[in-house]
Image (cartoon, grey):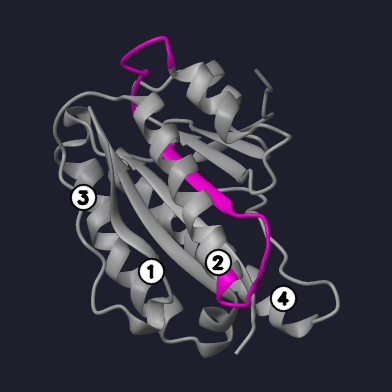
Amino acid sequence: MSQQILPFYLVCDESGSMSGEPIEAINKALPELHSEIGSNPVVTDKTRFCLIGFSSRAEILLPLSDLSTVTEIPALQASGGTDYAKAFDVLRETINDDVNTLKAQGHQVFRPAVFFLSDGLPANNGWEGAYRALTDPGWRPRPNILAFGFGQADQQTIQQVATTKAFMANGQLGPAQALQEFAKSLIRSIVNSGTQSASDQTEGATLVMPAEVPGFTTITAEAL
């Protein structure tokens, strides 16, 4: 059956600096995300979810899925560096393939939403080219990107990555608590987007972004 689909992508830093509390907080939140979204048929009808982890490489940990059909979301494992370029390359290729597949199945696909999370500086200075390809105005599936930074992440870099909203941990909460709030904001965004889209068939799928996230300061997204 043809549906209106809003794809969500969580692109999460799993470099060595994420070891300990940060990676544990995200891994603890993933089953909660799975349970809350996967058990809500209104939301799963309208949304799909994909998990990409990146360090010195990037890989798809959970392909774009209807969470009601997923047994469990794989855990992140911290190791290696922080290669933004590989993350953006894999994300662009994945979005392109996913959108083409969904359209071939007869679905109407709306602009994907990306939640990007990093606790460190990019491992190299060559990430801008991969980012420009991902956000190229001439590429129709280019995503809306919400970027979150904490730890040693650079505020200006996080601003540059975001196309809609950027958030920087402000130190009011510890890393684990801040990441729990990040996960809650992701869950709320998916649930609210799916619910609102279902209530308004004429407008199509709508991304509902978090207005604010406890423990994070909202900063203006900055174009490269």
The relative height of residue 45 versus residue 94 in the rendered view (above or below) is below
Disc 2/disc 3 C-alpha distance (Å): 20 Å
Disc 2/disc 1 C-alpha distance (Å): 9 Å
Furthest residue to the right?
202
SS type, badge 4:
helix
Disc 4/disc 3 C-alpha distance (Å): 30 Å
Q: Which residues are magenta?
A: 104-126
- Residue 27 image position (x, y, % from top left): 23, 56
Residue type at the position of mark 4: Gln
- Give residue 33's mark: 1
> Looking at the image, is mark 2 or mark 3 earlier in the sequence?
3
Disc 4/disc 1 C-alpha distance (Å): 18 Å
- Our reading of the magenta stretch's main secondary structure is loop
Residue identified by numbered label 3: 76
Q: Residues within 10 Å of mark 3 (few under 14, many from 20)?
A: many
Residue type at the position of mark 2: Ile
Residue identified by numbered label 4: 196
Task: Looking at the picture, tell me which residue is in the foreground, 108 or 81.
Answer: 108
Instruction: Please say if the residues under marks 2 and 1 sit with CB atoms less than 8 Å apart.
Output: yes
Disc 3/disc 1 C-alpha distance (Å): 14 Å
Instruction: Please say if the residues under marks 4 and 3 sit with CB atoms less than 8 Å apart.
Output: no
- Give residue 84's mark: none
SS type, badge 3:
loop
Residue type at the position of mark 1: Leu
